């Protein structure tokens, strides 16, 4: 199927998907019903982002991109070359490690058994990446964690990641994205 055909059917697909009750974990409800009857979760007021920055932690960040006609994908405000065909979709995975960070571009999602790595690019960062075990040794007093004892931690809106990307540029935006992955957001 070409992109125009997919786009033409996308609206109908999403409408049907939102009303589908095939999700076993939604216990017979549709995604639309869950979204319409769920209360939004906000961060507790007053909430302030800690002044001291947590270091970047080992891990992976996945992106989905469309290959441009010049055989590049735009990721974190940089055009990365890729050997895939233009107008195809690719998965880009940023690997954060203490000794070496790199960006790998694949043909399929990470959960697929067989996939092809089109390109690997070094990804220099302006700061060090620490292992999870080193990070866990730091006190978390500035970073409250939601629990049964503190259920209202999600009672205030946080700044948008897009705002952070535009205000501080991609290294700090990337930091905010990775930091936000540690918050207990509910994704439906």
Image: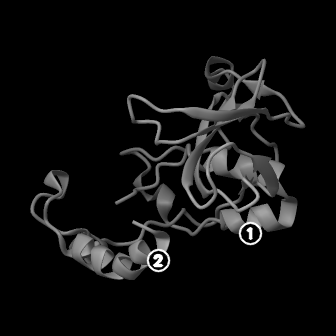
Estimate the spatial distance between the alpha carbons at disc 2 and disc 1, rounded to whole Å: 31 Å
Location of residue 48 in the rendering, given as x and y in whole percent from the top left corner: 71, 59
Location of residue 61 in the rendering, given as x and y in whole percent from the top left corner: 61, 41
Q: Is residue 7 above or below residue 28?
A: below
Task: Look at 67% across and 29% down and name the residue there.
Answer: 139
Location of residue 62 in the rendering, given as x and y in whole percent from the top left corner: 57, 44
Local crowd size for mark 1, using a 10 Å CA cut-off: few (<14), some (14–19), many (≥20): few
Nearer the camera: disc 2 or disc 1: 2
Q: Which mark is residue 163?
A: 1
Q: Is tag 2's residue or tag 1's residue first in the polypeptide sequence? A: 2
Which residue bears the numbered disc 2? 4
State left or right for residue 166 relative to residue 176. Answer: right
State left or right for residue 179 relative to residue 32. Answer: right
Q: Which mark is residue 77?
A: none
Element marked by disc 2: helix
**Which quadrant of the figure contains the C terminus?**
bottom left
Camera-nearest residue between 84 and 130: 84
Residue 59 visible in rendering:
yes
Please identify the residue farthest to the left as the structure is shown. Answer: 28
Element marked by disc 1: helix
């Amino acid at each position: 199927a070409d992109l125009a055909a997919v786009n033409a059917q996308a609206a109908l697909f999403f409408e049907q998907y939102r009303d589908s009750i095939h999700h076993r974990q939604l216990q017979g409800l549709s995604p639309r019903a869950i979204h319409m009857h769920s209360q939004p979760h906000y961060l507790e007021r007053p909430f302030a982002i800690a002044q001291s920055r947590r270091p970047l932690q080992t891990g992976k960040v996945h992106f989905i991109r469309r290959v441009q006609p010049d055989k590049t994908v735009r990721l974190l405000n940089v055009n990365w070359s890729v050997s895939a065909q233009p107008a195809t979709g690719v998965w880009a995975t940023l690997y954060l490690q203490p000794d070496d960070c790199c960006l790998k571009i694949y043909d399929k999602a990470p959960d697929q058994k067989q996939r092809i790595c089109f390109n690997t690019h070094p990804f220099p960062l302006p700061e060090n990446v620490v292992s999870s075990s080193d990070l866990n040794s730091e006190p978390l007093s500035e970073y409250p964690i939601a629990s049964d004892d503190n259920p209202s931690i999600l009672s205030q809106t946080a700044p948008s990641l897009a705002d952070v990307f535009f205000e501080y540029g991609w290294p700090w935006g990337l930091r905010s994205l990775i930091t936000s992955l540690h918050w207990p957001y509910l994704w439906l």
